[in-house]
Image (tube, rainbow, N blue to C red):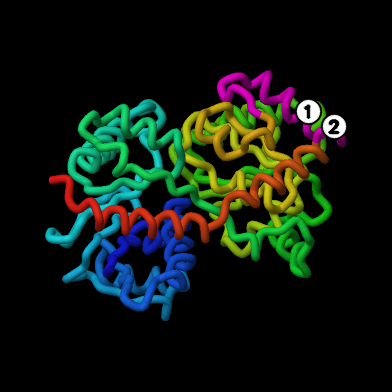
């Protein structure tokens, strides 16, 4: 079996959670390949851009080969919404969410239209689809009646349990000092500062939570389309809200471990890797009560309506003031995070490849 995996998201200058998924999948899958199997990496970006960023961001040098235009492969896997560049190969695609179809108001009209059309094209033409949650799988089958359920497989992302642990590391304090957090109590969120992530209501709820008085809110992520600066100014808490931008992956464990709680009150997600990462570090978690987030967290997080600022503020108060609740969330979160590994994600993906080879093209 010869597979080409498109890592275009990982090869970007600032990879998102989808880029993380692509890199971790390849790292976990490489040792599982048989003697007759071969995996090559490819990208839809320009050659010089891809080589530079895959080398510096992904650290995949030496794991497998790189081909801009892979030929003679059995399967071309677009590990995010894209198109196959090897016409004769079977085409597998990973779909991470259907937000641009289900909630177009949470992004620009142009992106909602173009990305939504790409999803519909994938569902009509791909030979096999990987969905990162049951929620996403169900939505795909609802959106495309011609899609055979046997060709849609759930492959849950995982988290790096070697790097993410509740045990303090030697450099934790120096990392937190780098962000001005040494000795501070803070609430943490991680992810692009985008409307679908709901950062505006998180700021409002943090400002209204009595137990958060004197604490910091740290919102780590690239600037997005959310008008969070205006809401921060209105809150009067500019001195207590930190926007460090995108944080290197190596720094995240220290920030998770130092946080009093982690918040991901998103309006829409297809999964939620930061939930697992914070749980693996022993941090109590607050989530929006959206299907994919509940699927990830199980009963190991406090879930609220992301549109209800008062309920969110009350939940922040409970987690910060109720030690028994916080300890229970830590214990349940550690157990929950252990259920998700990149090894399991890679193994399930390989099983999907072999299933696709047996079924052949749907065209």
Q: As displayed, is residue 61 above or below residue 222?
A: below
In the rendering, which numbered label is found on residue 317? 1
Of residues 35 and 197, the one nearer the viewer is: 35
Range shown magenta: 303-325
Residue 140 sits in quarter: top left
In three-dimensional space, the C-alpha distance between marks 2 and 1, rounded to whole angstroms, equals 6 Å
Q: Position of residue 252 (x, y in %)?
A: 64, 57
Q: Residues within 10 Å of mark 2 (few under 14, many from 20)?
A: some
79 lies left or right of 253: left
Q: As displayed, is residue 153 above or below residue 181?
A: above
- Do labels 2 and 1 touch, CB within 8 Å? yes
Mark 2 highlights which residue? 321
205 lies left or right of 212: left
Q: Residues within 10 Å of mark 1 (few under 14, many from 20)?
A: some
**310 in the magenta segment:** yes
- For residue 344, say whether it is visible: yes
Q: Position of residue 101 (x, y in %)?
A: 32, 30
Residue at 65 percent across and 38 percent down: it is: 263
Q: Position of residue 332 (x, y in %)?
A: 73, 41
């Amino acid at each position: 079996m010869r597979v080409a995996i498109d890592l275009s998201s990982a090869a970007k200058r600032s990879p998102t959670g989808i880029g993380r998924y692509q890199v971790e999948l390849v790292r976990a899958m490489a040792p599982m390949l048989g003697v007759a199997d071969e995996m090559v990496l490819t990208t839809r970006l320009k050659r010089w851009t891809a080589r530079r960023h895959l080398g510096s961001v992904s650290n995949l040098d030496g794991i497998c080969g790189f081909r801009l235009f892979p030929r003679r492969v059995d399967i071309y896997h677009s590990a995010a919404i894209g198109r196959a560049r090897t016409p004769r190969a079977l085409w597998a695609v990973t779909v991470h969410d259907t937000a641009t179809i289900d909630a177009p108001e949470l992004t620009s009209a142009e992106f909602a239209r173009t990305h939504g059309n790409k999803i519909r094209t994938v569902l009509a033409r791909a030979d096999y689809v990987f969905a990162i949650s049951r929620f996403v799988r169900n939505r795909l089958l609802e959106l495309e009646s011609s899609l055979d359920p046997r060709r849609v497989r759930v492959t849950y992302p995982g988290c790096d349990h070697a790097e993410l642990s509740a045990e303090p590391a030697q450099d934790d304090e120096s990392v937190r000092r780098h962000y001005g957090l040494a000795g501070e109590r803070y609430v943490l969120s991680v992810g692009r500062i985008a409307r679908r992530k709901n950062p505006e209501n998180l700021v409002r709820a943090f400002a209204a939570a009595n137990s958060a008085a004197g604490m910091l809110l740290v919102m780590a992520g690239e600037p997005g389309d959310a008008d969070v600066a205006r809401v921060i100014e209105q809150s009067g808490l500019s001195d207590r809200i930190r926007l460090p931008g995108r944080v290197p992956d190596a720094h995240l464990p220290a920030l998770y471990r130092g946080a009093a709680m982690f918040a991901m009150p998103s309006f829409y997600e297809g999964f939620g890797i930061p939930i697992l990462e914070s749980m693996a570090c022993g941090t109590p978690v607050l989530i929006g009560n959206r299907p994919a987030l509940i699927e990830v967290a199980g009963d190991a997080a406090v879930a609220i309506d992301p549109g209800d600022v008062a309920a969110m503020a009350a939940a922040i108060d409970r987690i910060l003031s109720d030690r028994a609740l916080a300890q229970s969330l830590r214990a349940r979160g550690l157990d929950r995070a252990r259920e998700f590994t990149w090894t399991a994600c890679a193994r399930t993906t390989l099983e999907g490849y072999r299933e696709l080879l047996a079924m052949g093209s749907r065209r």
